[in-house]
Amino acid sequence: MSTAQMGNGTLGAPLVELTNLVKRYHGRAILDGISAKFGQGEITAMIGPSGGGKSTLLRSLNGLNTIDGGEVRVGEYRFTPGKTCDRETLQAVRRMVGMVFQDFQLFPHLTALGNVMEAPVQVAGKSRAEAETRGRELLKRVGLGERTGHYPSQLSGGQKQRVAIARALAMEPRVLLCDEITSALDPELKHEVLDVLEDLRDDGLTILMVTHEIGFARRAANRVVVLAEGKIVEEGPPQQVIDAPITERTQRFLKNVLG
Ligand SMILES: Nc1ncnc2c1ncn2[C@@H]1O[C@H](COP(=O)(O)OP(=O)(O)OP(=O)(O)O)[C@@H](O)[C@H]1O
Ligand SMILES: [Mg+2]
């Protein structure tokens, strides 16, 4: 099923829900009682100071972190503390939730197409022919139809990041987590990556992006969440949170970032 097909009817319904989420490292609460809902077909931009817990929150959503309190729900799957998630559930959640990182993490010895085909063949057990057809479609979708045979070393940063997005999409996720995926890119290349995200959102994908791109958050995000010191200090539409922030913490953060 394509993301476009599932977009209709349930747009905005919370696909991911956090209830009083707590995550501790060495006894310190890094996430300190986070409750939030992320609607289907929406881009949520998560902003906030370094060390505030943004990456930890993303990692909690696909089982890369265990949690110490509260609950994470992704679709029909739930993570709670103390309960070791069975392998099947973890695999199902990881298929449902794709992730893209700042440093791409592409396999250097595989072409763009090889990177995109890898998980469908190795993890999902698809035939190479099927994975190749789909892989070519996805690379075309992110504007790289002409670069399928290129190795990562032969691609620009923006192109590598778009391969990484296509690779995540190859597992047909319903949620895409993006951790500062444009931070390493030149301004011009950021746009081509962000345009792809907007396009995917319009097709019904739920996108949660940690970003320092305040401009993009204002332009494309449906909602902005400000995370500082392990708590959500403000959330709402970008016009409110970015242009007219209510809390002192958000005001201070934006002043530091925007100068
Ligand atoms: N595996 C870990 N073990 C111990 N502490 C950790 C671990 N991962 C993260 N932390 C701590 O949790 C806090 C939040 O880290 P996190 O990476 O989530 O912040 P962030 O908001 O993503 O910051 P940045 O904007 O710099 O990426 C930091 O104080 C960090 O040192
Ligand atoms: Mg981070």
Image (cartoon, rainbow, N blue to C red):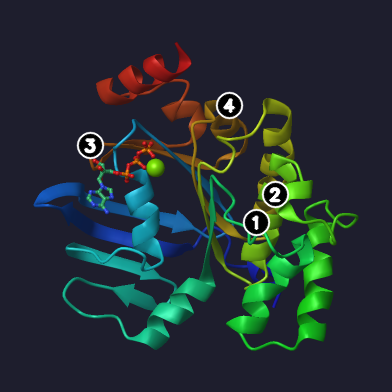
Which residue does the numbered mark 4 point to in the structure image? 215
Q: Is residue 8 visible?
A: no
**Amino acid type, mark 4:** Gly
Classify 55 as above or below 82: above
Classify 220 as above or below 245: below
Q: Name which residue lies at 73% across and 49% down.
A: 153
Query: Do the residues under discs 3 and 4 have CB atoms within 8 angstroms?
Result: no
Q: Name which residue lies at 44% across and 56% down.
A: 38
Q: How far apart in space, not on screen, are marks 2 and 3 (Cα)?
A: 32 Å
Residue 7: quarter of image: bottom right
Q: How far apart in space, not on screen, are marks 3 and 4 (Cα)?
A: 23 Å
In primary-sequence order, the first of circles 1 and 3 is: 1
Picture disc at residue 160: 2
For the residue carrying disc 2, how many other residues have a C-alpha within 10 Å: few (<14), some (14-19), or many (20+)? many
Q: Name which residue lies at 33% across and 25% down.
A: 250
Which residue does the numbered mark 3 point to in the structure image? 229
In primary-sequence order, the first of circles 2 and 3 is: 2
In front of the other: 32 or 37: 32
